[in-house]
Amino acid sequence: MDITRLSDPLGASITGVDLSQDISGAEGAAIRQALLDNVVIVFPGQKLADEDQERFCRNFGELELVRTGTAVGGEHPHVMMITNVKDTGQPTALEEGEMMFHYDQCYYEHPCLGATLFAMEVPDEGGNTLFSNCALAYDALSDEWKHRLDGLKALNYYDYAGNPTMRPDGFKPDVAQWVHPVIRTHPETGRKAIYVNRLMTMRIEGLERDESDEILNYLFDHIEKPEFVYEHRWSVGELMMWDNRCSVHARTYFSPEKRRMMRRVTVRDPSPVA
């Protein structure tokens, strides 16, 4: 098994392992360490069925049941199709277009540990995935900013359509939302990371709106700086996994006329955000 770094801020490619087969305990431990070291790991040239992807993810913990009506169903309730391809007969999620940087499930008490995407069809242009290393971004903050952010908490709101404070209907109380620390500590590495995102972090608790907006806009711009970001251009047969505890991700625009099909399996994380 060979591990090759993909960019300075984060990302590694792992070759020499066939994930359609069981992996050994030593291989599983090495892959887990690679995720902790690199935040995002990519396995090119894989041929994976639903059950193969599920089996791989179980090396990291319990699998998340798909909650949004986009599960494949049947024997694979942990599998979600993220696609704009309508002729599969399956419901779709997050179909096309651009998506801003975000943490997955930050609107829940226990956001997921991470997730995998398997590339089944990819457009020849666009539809790339960007990742930002929010631990690296935290390290780059000045001591003054680190002190200012210490102890702050922010409201995260489940709204993939964009910030509800910018829409006439505003917040909806029945939509999933949760307050988490602005700076969280990774439960395995002990590293601190900025834990806000442009898509779903709405406000900092206990601050006036102007100060909250000032801090959040600074942090959004900071974590999206090129020196913290890796952009991945997909190839069919790649399996990617990312650590959702210390990285945000986004998607670049692609035409709705172009086919894109990704299969997702998500790993639960019972540990609290702290």
Image: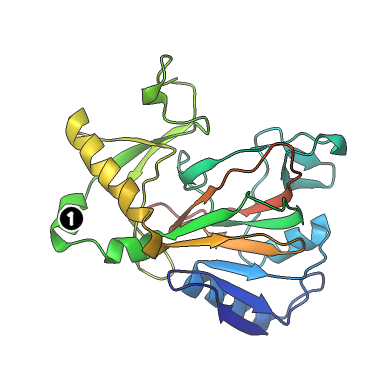
Residue 156 spot, x, y in % from top left: 40, 37
Q: How is the image coloured?
A: rainbow
| Residue 253 seen in the current view | yes
Query: Could you say which is closer to the camera, residue 147 or residue 239?
Result: 239
60 is higher (above) or lower (below) than 156: below
Q: Which residue is the extreme one toward the top?
A: 168
| Residue 228 horizontal side relative to residue 116, left or right | left
The N terminus appears in which quarter of the rendering?
bottom right
121 is higher (above) or lower (below) than 10: above
What residue do we see at 60% from left, 53% from top? 128
The C terminus appears in which quarter of the rendering?
bottom left
Residue 131 spot, x, y in % from top left: 49, 57
Residue 56 spot, x, y in % from top left: 71, 66
Residue 11 spot, x, y in % from top left: 53, 69
Exactly how many numbered labels are in the figure?
A: 1
Residue 178, by quadrant, is: top left
Residue 4, by quadrant, is: bottom right
In the structure shown, which secondary structural element does the residue marked by tag 1 occupy? Answer: helix
| Residue 274 seen in the current view | no
| Residue 39 horizontal side relative to residue 258, left or right | left
Query: Could you say which is closer to the camera, residue 248 or residue 49?
Result: 248
What residue do we see at 22% from left, 49% from top? 151
Q: Which residue is the extreme one toward the front?
A: 125
Crowd tier of the residue under label 1, counting other residues whose Cα lies within 10 Å: few below 14, some 14–19, many 20 or above: few
Residue at the spot of label 1: 145
What residue do we see at 46% from left, 46% from top? 101
Residue 257, by quadrant, is: top right
What residue do we see at 71% from left, 64% from top? 238
Q: As shown in the figure, which amino acid type bears the numbered disc 1?
A: Trp
